[in-house]
């Protein structure tokens, strides 16, 4: 058994210390003239952004995703009422195997959504005049008060209101 202190790494592997290379010091363009800012962390703090966002490099979008996004956009323009499930079915018919959650994610990234009636459509509109209910507290005993004098047939009235 080998002594762990004298363990040798297989060829092609390293402990990472040899891989570290010195890079030039990074600075933000807006703070080029500032002295003694304290590196990227200090510069990020001065700008009011998180330090992690300084180092973040977004992944480029693949050609496959761009093709799917283009097809989703075309389908959404033709059928704006379709949601993620129907769009997934359309893409599957076109030969693209994709799941509903992936379609929903791409729709969110693209900023598109299905066109449908949203809830709370009967909320009051600000500034709209509200008319009072004028029959509150009145006892309705005859038909003309409730239905008006223009109604002549009484067969469709409730029995309690028939004259």
Image (tube, rainbow, N blue to C red):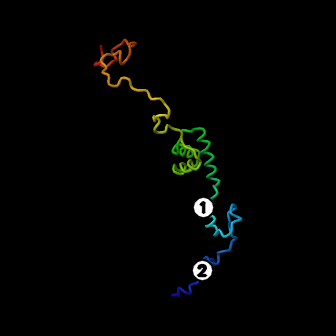
Name which residue lies at 69% across and 60% down: 30
Q: Secondary structure at mark 2?
A: loop
Q: Which mark is residue 154?
A: none
The residue positioned farthest toward the top in the image shown: 152
Q: Work out which quarter of the rendered image holds the C terminus and state it.
A: top left
Q: Is residue 104 left or right of residue 40?
A: left
Percent x, y of residue 122? 45, 34
Looking at the image, is 19 positioned above or below residue 94? below
Q: Which mark is residue 10?
A: 2
Labels 2, 1: front one: 1
Name which residue lies at 65% across and 53% down: 63
Name the quadrant containing residue 62: bottom right
Sort mark 1 into few (<14), some (14-19) or many (20+) by Cα contacts within 10 Å.
Answer: few
Percent x, y of residue 46? 62, 63
The residue identified by callout 1 is: 53
Name which residue lies at 58% across and 49% down: 96
Q: Secondary structure at mark 1?
A: helix
Quick one: 130 or 12, which is closer to the camera? 130
């Amino acid at each position: 058994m080998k002594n762990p202190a004298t363990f040798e790494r297989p060829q092609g592997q390293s402990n990472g210390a040899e891989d570290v290379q010195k890079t030039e010091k990074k600075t933000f363009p807006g703070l080029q003239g500032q002295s003694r800012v304290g590196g990227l962390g200090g510069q990020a703090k001065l700008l009011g952004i998180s330090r992690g966002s300084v180092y973040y490099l977004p992944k480029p979008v693949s050609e496959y995703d761009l093709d799917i996004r283009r097809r989703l956009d075309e389908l959404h323009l033709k059928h704006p009422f379709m949601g993620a499930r129907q769009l997934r079915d359309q893409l599957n018919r076109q030969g693209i195997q994709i799941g509903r959650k992936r379609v929903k994610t791409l729709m969110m990234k693209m900023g598109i959504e299905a066109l449908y009636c949203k809830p709370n459509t009967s909320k009051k509109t600000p500034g709209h005049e509200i008319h009072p209910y004028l029959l509150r507290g009145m006892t309705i005993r005859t038909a003309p008060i409730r239905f008006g004098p223009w109604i002549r047939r009484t067969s469709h009235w409730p029995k309690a209101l028939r004259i």
